[in-house]
Image (spheres, rainbow, N blue to C red):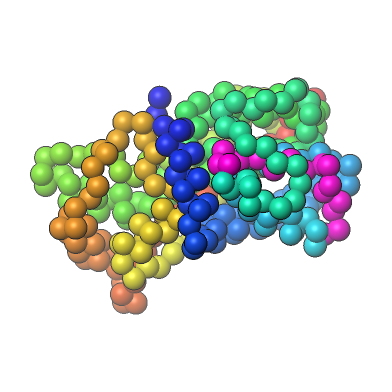
Amino acid sequence: MIFDRNLYEKHRDRAACLDVECDFLFNKIIDIIFEKLSVFLNQDDSLLHLGCRNDKLVDLLQSSNFSFKEKLLQCDISYNTISKVRYGRKVVLDEEFLPFMEQTFNIVMSTMSLHCVNNLPSVLLRINDVLKKDGVFIGTVFGPQTLNELRYSILSIESKSGVVTSRVIPFIRAVDVTNLLKQSRFVNSVLDVHTITVKYKSVLDLFHDLRSMGETNMLYTRNKSFLSKSLITEIEKFYIDNFVQDDHYIPATFEMIIMQGTKLK
């Protein structure tokens, strides 16, 4: 087991209760998903949205005059998150256990909810099962360049003490995503990679955003101790020396892999 799903649920529940919303990455991803979705979306299609987080998708559907009532099922692992979602039918679920009959949905979408499942091949096969014939899957995961600056800075500083731990989770490569789609019986696969660089005034600001996203470390085997103030100072100095450019802001890379596949007839 790589990821502690119970801990991830707690992180997401906690984030949903914070006063500060931090959905800018996920809203950008939903914009990309909707652009792809709008090409083949029909009024009679039934939609499953995994990792919905908010009502951004519904707003886009409304703007395109899509009648989503009774046709959109919004799902999230976090009860606190799903309770804030206003539209569509709503279900709290873990993506590792999809409780649906085979051939239920025309379209399944996932908004950054699969990067921390423990058995991605099994989950993709299950998504294929719940799709109707010719159904379409559009999923998103973080790629390996995500938070590479932070990962390298922490490892470089902690390695000085001889104790190196994983504080940033591993992310899947695009080539592996392509292979998994084929293994999961998807055809006509399309893969896009988008990279966003977010600028921060400090490492603590970056940590704050990750906490607000519910995306802090959820590894099952992890260092449970907090980074000390002195260690954070060292990490930030290394970060600045190696990654900061003329604008003096700390860059944080987020690589997003958007996958699309059609269920084989």
User: Which residues are the magenta region?
Assistant: 64-79
* Front residue (pair 146, 49): 49
* Front residue (pair 116, 262): 116
Q: Residue furthest left?
A: 161
Give the residue displayed 74% in from the left and 59% down from the top. 59
Expressed as whole percent of the image width and height from the top left, the position of residue 180 reads 56, 29
Tell how many labels: 0
Expressed as whole percent of the image width and height from the top left, the position of residue 185 reads 67, 25
Q: Is the residue 86 above or below the residue 48 in the image?
A: below
Q: Is 76 on the left or on the right of 162, as rendered?
A: right
Q: Quadrant of residue 252?
A: bottom left
Magenta span includes 76: yes
The quadrant in which the C terminus is found is top right
Q: Is 205 on the left or on the right of 194, as rendered?
A: left
* Front residue (pair 68, 39): 68
Majority secondary structure of magenta residues: loop
Give the residue displayed 46% in from the left and 41% down from the top. 10
Q: Is the residue 253 above or below the residue 79 in the image?
A: below
Q: Is the residue 115 above or below the residue 2 in the image?
A: below
Q: Is residue 175 visible?
A: no
Q: Is 38 on the left or on the right of 153, as rendered?
A: right
The quadrant in which the N terminus is found is top left
Q: Quadrant of residue 220?
A: top left
Expressed as whole percent of the image width and height from the top left, the position of residue 103 reads 78, 26
